[in-house]
Image: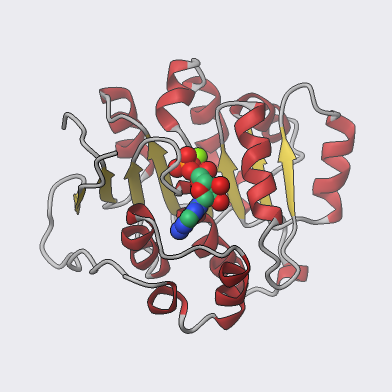
Amino acid sequence: ANNDIQVKRTFDEKPGMRPVPNPVLTFEQAFKPFPDILQEIYKQDFEMPSPIQSQAWPVLLRGDDLIGIAQTGTGKTLAFLLPALIHIDGQTIPREQREGPTVLIMAPTRELALQIDKEVSKYQYKGIKSVCLYGGGDRKEQIKVVAKGVDIVIATPGRLNDLVMARHLNIINFSYIVLDEADRMLDMGFEPQIRKSLFDVRPDRQTVMTSATWPSGVRRLAESYMKDPIQVNVGSLDL
Ligand code: ADP
Ligand code: MG
């Protein structure tokens, strides 16, 4: 695979924007202030950050929005997940007092959602809990788990929209939102569910989007939901 990497502002450069941060070369460089996260990474026996992680971590840790364009198997899950864990822990309102979960990860299919959930469960950080919501899963049970209290919701757009409309989830509580494999979600016709679910999203949230390609539909979604996103492209792409 071609691991050429490009990083830039997605839309117009505006005066006063911070420059794009330099990539980190090691896990220590990225997570020095978070020894518990480093411990969790060491358990995985990874050698070094993947190109997308090198570029994504400093962007996400400083709170900027990020678009990651990369093929499968490039390590996108950890690229958005580890900053998500730190985001949850860094909220000013203690976790017990929050109205609902903090992080929302949307994925196109049940299989992909379950894969992300599996990855999430490998990282034990401050007792952070997740739930995976997808069509065909036991809806009552999902609602029960959400009501008991979780920090991360991983969901397919259909079931998410269903639970948001039925007021089992209040989208305004989410302050870190990931649209994983956005191009596939659009290809599968999920745009209406995504837009309906995100109708009431909080303006001060952080938003991440990943995609293998960069078609106009994905670009429009980014324009609607992201604030001055930094874009990282990995591999050879027709851009
Ligand atoms: P993507 O979402 O880009 O398709 P994943 O995030 O699912 O890719 O990662 C693919 C695999 O690579 C997973 O098994 C994951 O544990 C592993 N992985 C992630 N980061 C690294 C790394 N820095 N070094 C080695 N393997 C990694
Ligand atoms: Mg993935």
Say which quarter of the image contains residue 237.
Answer: top left
Q: Which of 79 and 150 is in front in this view?
A: 79
State the colouring used for the structure image: secondary structure
Q: Which residue lies at the image location 52% right of the left edge and 21% below the top edge? A: 190
Q: Position of 38 compared to 126: left or right?
A: left
Q: Where is residue 6 in the image (x, y as percent from the top left)?
A: 19, 50
Q: Which residue lies at the image location 33% right of the left edge and 38% below the top edge? A: 222
Say which quarter of the image contains residue 184.
Answer: top left
Q: In which quarter of the image is the N terminus?
A: top left
Residue 128 in sight from this viewpoint:
yes
Q: In which quarter of the image is the C terminus?
A: top left
Q: Nearer the viewer, residue 46 or 200?
A: 46
Q: Position of 19 compared to 23: left or right?
A: left
Badge count:
0
Q: Nearer the viewer, residue 133 or 206?
A: 133
Q: Where is residue 60 in the image (x, y as percent from the top left)?
A: 40, 62
Whether 173 is drawn above or below 198: the answer is below
Q: Which residue lies at the image location 38% right of the left edge and 78% below the top edge? A: 29
Whether 35 is drawn above or below 238: the answer is below
Q: Which residue lies at the image location 71% right of the left edge and 42% below the top edge? A: 169
Residue 201 in sight from this viewpoint:
no
Whether 194 is drawn above or below 79: the answer is above
Say which quarter of the image contains residue 141.
Answer: top right
Q: Position of residue 83 (x, y in %)?
A: 50, 64
Q: Position of 239 compared to 197: left or right?
A: left
Q: Which of 102 and 123 is in front in this view?
A: 123
